[in-house]
Image (tube, rainbow, N blue to C red):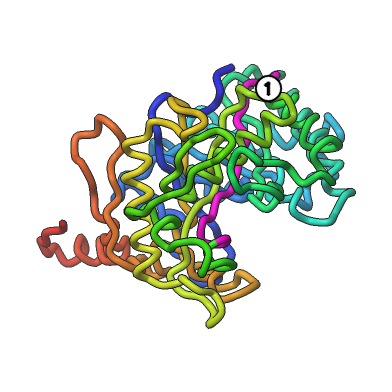
Amino acid sequence: MSSGVSELPTFGINYGMVANDLPTPADVVTLLQTIRVSKTRLYDADSSVLRTFTNTGISFIVGVRNEELHLLGNASNAFRWVKENVYAHLPDIHISAIVVGNEIFSTNDTALMRQVLPAMQNIHLALSLFNIDHDIIVSTAHSFSIITTSYPPSSGQFDPAIATVYMKPMLNFLSKIGAPFFINVYPFFPYKENPTLIPLEYALFQPNAGIQDAVTNLHYTNMFDAQLDAVYFAMAALGYHNITLLVSETGWPSAGDENEIGATIQNAKIYHENLIKHISSWHGTPYRPGSNIEVYLFALFNEDMKPGPLSERNYGLFKPDGTMVYEFKFFDQPNASASFVSLGLSTMLLSFILSVAYIMHFT
């Protein structure tokens, strides 16, 4: 099996649904096709959503919900889950990966932590029984908070409470099956916590002096690369040097509570535009030059039912009515026919245009 990451850097987007006012899946199909995004991630395996994407050319990462994990420690249950949630949709729907649980190792639930690897192993076994294990990745998504030491990047270490007991066996499994380590990377969080110590320009990919890792002499001009390398160093510290990374979430909120420094529309726009430019000219990280990358933006929509601070409900590139939160250019994939497309086309507006036969021009 390959490393699971595309040979060229590619983008996808997270399709979260913790809201009561989202467009229909059919409208989402139109929106994704309009902005030319061909990869998306669901946090479950909702069959009604997946069926809507039949023969659309849009690839999915699907998820096993955290509350389902205890069932998948049983191989028969895992086989049934794969049969009903993955195999039943093939080949009309392209499923590229299964994320077995989300951000579990940043919780204190050790019982849930113990369920992750057996569930991953059983899901992979089920895929092999259907002879699709070489086509579909199995992994789990991690919060960056599992890296308790990240500055400088060469000091990257997993939380000691999980490093040997949970991370090392998981990395061994990922190495054996050739799957990437899924990591959620948010430069916004460390900036919010230390705005006087971390230059905003460093978090937003803007010109800045950067930092020098005194141990490796590697130079970093942005926090995104530094965070990725901290994960690479953490894996290397456990003896794993060849596992690739997939950025399963990254984004910047357009609004936040009063104490959420930096959560503004302007910063969100700058972060996403510069992230796209950075990945589009990707040459790897300072520690892993030439490494491949696949990045999933968070998120497609603002989700009004997400708990927590205001920022949690304001990561979307689009409002639920299909209009963009801020003007934003999404660069095409490498070798595409156009250099970029605008994210400003609302699916609802498109439907209206077609119904009244107006002719309009979009940039």
Magenta span: 176-190
Q: Is residue 213 left or right of residue 111?
A: left
Q: Position of residue 123 (x, y in %)?
A: 73, 31
Can residue 323 be seen by looking at this rendering?
no
- Return the residue found at the far bottom: 258
Q: Position of residue 4 (x, y in %)?
A: 54, 26
Q: Is residue 273 left or right of residue 302?
A: left
Picture residue at 34% right of the left edge, 69% below the top: 266
Q: Position of residue 29 (x, y in %)?
A: 39, 50
Local packing at callout 1 (Cα closer than 10 Å; few below 14, some 14-19, many 20+) is: some
Secondary structure category for the residue under label 1: helix
Q: Is residue 181 magenta?
A: yes
Q: Depth check: give the residue in front, 53 or 180.
A: 180
Picture residue at 51% right of the left edge, 76% below the top: 256
Q: Is residue 196 magenta?
A: no
Picture residue at 46% right of the left edge, 55% below the top: 25
Q: Depth check: give the residue in front, 266 or 190.
A: 190
Image-quadrant location for residue 9: top left
Can residue 263 be seen by looking at this rendering?
yes
Say which residue label 1 marks. 175
Q: Is residue 281 left or right of residue 233?
A: left
The image shows residue 214, relative to residue 253, as above or below, that is above
- Return the residue found at the far right: 111
The image shows residue 189, relative to residue 166, as above or below, that is below
Question: Residue type at mark 1?
Answer: Ser
Q: How many marks?
A: 1
